Amino acid sequence: MIESEQINVTKVFLPKQKEYQEILKRAWDNSWMTNRGELVKELEHKITSTYQTVPVIATTNGTLPLQIAIKALDLTGEIITTPFSYVATTSSIVWEGLTPVFVDIDVDTFTIDPKKIEEKISDKTSAILATHVFGNPCHVEAIEKIAKKHDLKVIYDAAHSFGVRYKGTSMFNYGDVSTCSFHATKIFHTAEGGAVFTNDKRLFNKLFYHHNFGHDGPEQFQGIGINAKMSEIQAAMGLAVWPYLEAIFNRRKLLFELYQELLDSRLRFQSIREHTTYNYSYIPVVFENEAQLLNIQKVLNAHKVYPRRYFYPSLNKLPYLDNQPMPVSEGISKCILCLPLYYELKENQVETISCLINKNLN
Ligand SMILES: *Cc1c(COP(=O)(O)O)cnc(C)c1O
């Protein structure tokens, strides 16, 4: 390969520095760096109006909103969750002093398998916390039905779901609470950042107080809180990235489809749920076995291509948990690789990567 530059699984999208500075200037002019300045409010408004979402609070990352949601919903005991997600989904439950009870995933969609949820519900279960894996919507109808029947709350970790619609509505509108991440590696970013969404007014107020120390005005407190506020500096990055979003989605779709067209048919892709407008946030491929994956990873690394084993390991294997065997999630974790996918990636780089993979499959 003639490539000299290193190709990682992702590369942060950066607007022109001048564009970022122009927006930052507003924060300077206001002498206002944080505590819900006009840039944070403008970003929140752009999100709710562009994607027709329920009310949102911008936060400083995508993990605190999970923790705040668990608090605000007064959850106790056990939370049913997925072993196939980023560690933050599980660690938030443990951090809040609750017990994650894993339910294995569907082999095709990689999201929590609703058929296996009910057998894990006990009298200690208070909620279901599921991830829309790689932006692929969970089986939201089945989950809602189970939650209603057993009087459970539903939180969606929608960290990957920016821009995704299911049955015509934003993923952020599902569940009692949805959260998102605007980390630099995500499809839309504010360097570090995130958001929490809910349509329940009382719950919204609780989340709002929780994200700002419990403050209700300078001298009053509405219960306990923590600091999860987004700063103006972060919001400015979001506002600078915003005008490029359509171009980012389109570019990723093109590259995603090129991979699908070029890669050997022995490799398996995630099945995206019907009625989904997808955001092409990742291109995960499932190899036939782990040895095959490890060999391809070695070949690619030798050509300065660094895909990522994601999600690996399966979260039931975390050292601070009792291991609950999750055969489907563990099997997929061992065989899944996310290939490079980002705005600046070139078609010929996708071709080279695909060709290297196909030639070295054994
Ligand atoms: C990125 C991510 C998070 C955490 O978001 P941060 O903004 O990095 O705190 C949580 N859940 C999932 C599924 C993620 O991919």
Image (cartoon, grey):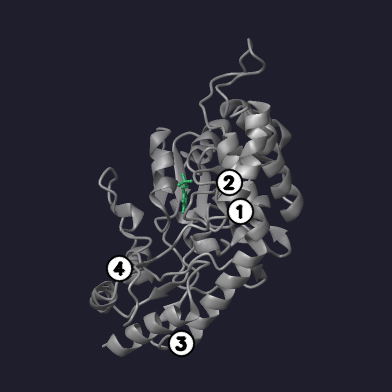
Q: Which residue is mark 4?
A: 334
Q: Is residue 199 visible?
A: no
The x, y position of residue 143, in whole percent, is 58, 56
Residue for point 33% across, 84% down: 356
The amino acid marked with disc number 2 is Met
Q: Is residue 255 left or right of residue 4?
A: right
Marks 2 and 4 close (CB-CB < 8 Å): no
Measured Cα–Cα span from mark 1 to mark 4: 34 Å
Q: Nearer the viewer, mark 2 or mark 3?
A: 2
In depth, the one of 98 and 264 nearer the eye is: 264
Q: Which residue is mark 3?
A: 262
- Up/down of 17 relative to 352, above or below: above
Measured Cα–Cα span from mark 3 to mark 1: 30 Å
In depth, the one of 128 and 318 nearer the eye is: 318
Label 4 vs 3, first from the N-terminus: 3
Residue for point 58% across, 46% down: 237
Marks 2 and 1 close (CB-CB < 8 Å): yes
The x, y position of residue 124, in whole percent, is 46, 38
Query: What is the secondary structure assignment of the residue under circle 3?
Result: helix
Q: Which residue is mark 2?
A: 237
Label 1 vs 4, first from the N-terminus: 1
Label 3 vs 1, first from the N-terminus: 1
In depth, the one of 113 and 92 nearer the eye is: 92
The amino acid marked with disc number 3 is Leu
Measured Cα–Cα span from mark 2 to mark 4: 36 Å
- Up/down of 29 relative to 47, above or below: above
Q: Which residue is mark 1?
A: 241
Query: What is the secondary structure assignment of the residue under circle 1?
Result: helix
How many labels sit on residues?
Answer: 4
The amino acid marked with disc number 1 is Val
Q: Is residue 38 visible?
A: yes
The amino acid marked with disc number 4 is Lys
